[in-house]
Image (cartoon, rainbow, N blue to C red):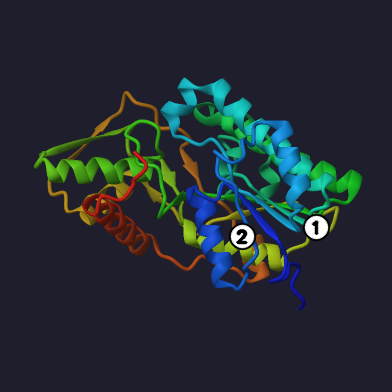
């Protein structure tokens, strides 16, 4: 089959310094796409409508991948709800609208599995969108992402804009955020267990009961799925316009903590603070639609964790910049 994007296309990756965006840039380059456009936050503030419009008018990319977003864990979402909603809405609205107005031929919006209702049937199918209340601990981010999906869909319905959306499960890997309070569960645990090992601590206390189940996808697998879908997936107008991206398997947070403890070499006791929130009881994506197209995740969790922990520790030892 002929591919929907070409090696000669000018491809703009918004958010190229983030974990997802940088992985997508690496994957595009490995596939022979050489005309990749990027803009640092210092060069272009995507929350500024005039600056974004001017950039698109000057560069007119053929393909746009929106991986830029304000992200964070449970505490960050609870502490800064207005920031998460406002900043993500601004970024999405400005980039999506200008890509359409400036004639970009193809558009990819990266969402999140948090768009689905808290108690959606498991595994979660794409049809679950907008069928129930959201998980309160990340509803502001989720509402912004839902708006992005629907804006892409509206532009396709009204103007024929070729926009698709991918909903990845929990990501991890190179370029993650390891902040002790603003990061997601997996990188936060990597930092916590590594520091406990370095300080010879005997106990690490984790939030919640450890019973919720989560699915984790290496960011390089997401990047592979993104390029695959850009090249091959063009849904009809009456089809689902967003696809789940995941592994199709999950683990308990307790099992995850045990695997990370082993990967970091921590030999002590793992305790659980049940007074802290658990979040959604389970979040496993149904990835059958993407699988039917011919794509599956390739990196097992135990391999991905080992390489991620090694990269984190080696980066600290070599004095590299780690997002703390």
Give the number of the disc on residue 116. none
- Mark 2 to mark 1: distance in Å? 16 Å
Q: In the rendered view, would you say 211 is above or below 291?
A: above
- Observer-nearest residue: 300 or 148? 148
Query: Does residue 240 appear in the picture of this structure?
Result: no
Assess whether mark 1 and mark 2 are in contact (beta carbons under 8 angstroms).
no
- Observer-nearest residue: 229 or 119? 229
The quadrant of the picture occupied by the C terminus is top left
Give the number of the disc on residue 105. 1
- Indicate the position of residue 133 as horizontal and vertical percent values: 62, 29
Instruction: Determine whether the residue tagged by mark 2 lies in a helix, strand or loop.
Output: helix
Which label sits in the foreground, 2 or 1?
1
Going 72% across and 32% down the picture, which residue do you hit? 49
Going 57% across and 46% down the picture, which residue do you hit? 15
Sequence-first disc among 2 and 1: 1
Number of numbered discs overlaid on the protein picture? 2
- Indicate the position of residue 186 as horizontal and vertical percent values: 36, 45
Going 16% across and 41% down the picture, which residue do you hit? 196
- Observer-nearest residue: 11 or 166? 11
Instruction: Determine whether the residue tagged by mark 1 lies in a helix, strand or loop.
Output: loop
- Indicate the position of residue 27 as horizontal and vertical percent values: 54, 65
The quadrant of the picture occupied by the N terminus is bottom right
Badge 1 crowding class, 10 Å Cα cut-off, few under 14, some 14 to 19, many 20 or more, is some
Give the residue number, with chain letter if any, for mark 2: 226
Badge 2 crowding class, 10 Å Cα cut-off, few under 14, some 14 to 19, many 20 or more, is many
- Observer-nearest residue: 93 or 291? 93
**Left/right of residue 128 with respect to residue 198 in the rendered view:** right
Query: Does residue 48 appear in the picture of this structure?
Result: yes
């Amino acid at each position: 089959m002929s591919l929907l994007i070409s090696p000669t296309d000018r491809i703009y990756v918004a958010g190229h310094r983030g974990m997802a965006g940088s992985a997508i840039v690496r994957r595009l380059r490995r596939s022979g796409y050489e005309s990749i456009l990027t803009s640092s936050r210092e060069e272009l503030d995507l929350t500024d409508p005039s600056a974004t419009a001017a950039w698109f008018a000057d560069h007119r990319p053929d393909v746009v991948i929106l991986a830029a977003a304000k992200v964070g864990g449970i505490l960050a979402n609870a502490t800064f709800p207005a920031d998460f909603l406002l900043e993500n809405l601004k970024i999405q609205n400005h980039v999506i609208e200008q890509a359409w107005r400036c004639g970009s031929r193809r558009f990819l919006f990266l969402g999140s599995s948090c768009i689905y209702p808290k108690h959606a049937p498991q595994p979660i199918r794409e049809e679950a969108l907008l069928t129930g209340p959201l998980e309160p601990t990340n509803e502001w981010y989720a509402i912004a992402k839902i708006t992005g999906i629907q804006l892409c869909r509206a532009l396709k319905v009204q103007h024929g804009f070729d926009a698709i959306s991918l909903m990845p499960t929990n990501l991890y890997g190179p370029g993650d955020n390891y902040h002790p309070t603003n990061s997601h569960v997996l990188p936060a645990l990597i930092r916590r267990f590594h520091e406990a090992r370095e300080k010879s601590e005997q106990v690490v206390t984790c939030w919640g009961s450890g019973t919720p189940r989560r699915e984790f996808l290496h960011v390089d697998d997401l990047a592979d799925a993104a390029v695959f879908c850009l090249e091959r997936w063009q849904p009809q107008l009456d089809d689902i316009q967003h696809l789940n991206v995941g592994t199709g398997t999950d683990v308990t947070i307790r099992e995850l903590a045990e695997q990370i403890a082993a990967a970091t070499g921590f030999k002590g006791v793992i305790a659980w603070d049940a007074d802290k929130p658990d979040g959604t009881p389970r979040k496993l994506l149904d990835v059958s639609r993407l699988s039917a197209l011919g794509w599956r995740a390739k990196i097992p969790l135990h391999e991905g964790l080992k390489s991620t922990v090694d990269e984190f520790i080696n980066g600290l030892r070599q004095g590299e910049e780690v997002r703390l």
